[in-house]
Amino acid sequence: MAHEQGNEGKSLLLVDDDRPFLNRLGRAMEQRGLDVRMAESVAEGIAEVRKQPPEYAVVDLRLGDGNGLDVIEALHKVRPEARGIVLTGYGNIATAVSAVKLGAIDYLSKPADADAVYGALMAPPDQRAALPENPMSADRVRWEHIQRVYELCNRNVSETARRLNMHRRTLQRILAKRAPR
């Protein structure tokens, strides 16, 4: 399969269960000259990879039917040179390390704008990702972590408090507040 120079014919698979975000990002990437295919689940993403492995992939970490890293792993097995990026609303280092080990080239936190996604996809392989212009504050990272554990405990406050080694009432107060900036 010969590809012309430039972006013509460059295939991109977007996998995200947030349909409005998926459609916006898809349109933005098409405007930048990429041939975009979209999927809304791990199963659909893996099916698209098997049907026609793309050169690029942007995959949400948390999907309704599982972990987006499974799509990255499937893509890396059939097309090792493919460039995949993981998007997540829950920026944590352990997941970033897993993503890179499974073949992702970068890790962006949501909401990522189209320029950041495109820049990460097209960056030279030896170039490291730039530091985010507005990284999350320590309070925000803590809040995100608490929210993630709360979701993983099926919104059970007592179980979340136990796992976080935190008093239940303290946790309830945190959960009742808005997310810090």
Image (cartoon, rainbow, N blue to C red):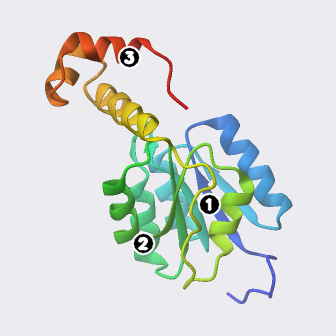
Q: Gap in Å between the C-alphas at discs 3 and 1?
A: 35 Å
Residue 147 visible in the picture: yes
**Left or right, 70 with reference to 28:** left
Q: Amino acid at mark 2?
A: Gly
Residue 156 visible in the picture: no
**Left or right, 24 with reference to 173:** right
Residue 82 spot, x, y in % from top left:
54, 76
Which residue ends up furthest to the right in the rendered image?
31
Callout 2: SS:
loop
Question: Which residue, given by chain and number where applicable, does mark 2 sit on?
Answer: 103
Viewer-proximal residue among 12 and 85: 85
Task: Report if the CB atoms under discs 3 and 2 are less than 8 Å apart.
Answer: no
Q: Gap in Å between the C-alphas at discs 1 and 2?
A: 15 Å
Q: Quadrant of residue 54?
A: bottom right
Query: Which of the two marks, 3 or 1, is nearer to us in this view?
Result: 3
Question: Which residue, given by chain and number where applicable, does mark 3 sit on?
Answer: 175
Q: Which mark is residue 97?
A: none
Residue 10 spot, x, y in % from top left:
72, 74
Q: Earlier in the sequence, mark 1 or mark 2?
A: 1
As drawn, 14 above or below 158 = below
Q: Residue at x 29, y 31 (%)?
A: 149
Q: Residue at x 50, y 25 (%)?
A: 179
Q: Amino acid at mark 1?
A: Leu
Query: Which of the two marks, 1 or 2, is nearer to us in this view?
Result: 2
Viewer-proximal residue among 162 and 25: 162
Residue 175 spot, x, y in % from top left:
38, 16
Residue 100 spot, x, y in % from top left:
40, 68
Q: Earlier in the sequence, mark 3 or mark 2?
A: 2
Question: Which residue, given by chain and number where applicable, does mark 1 sit on?
Answer: 13
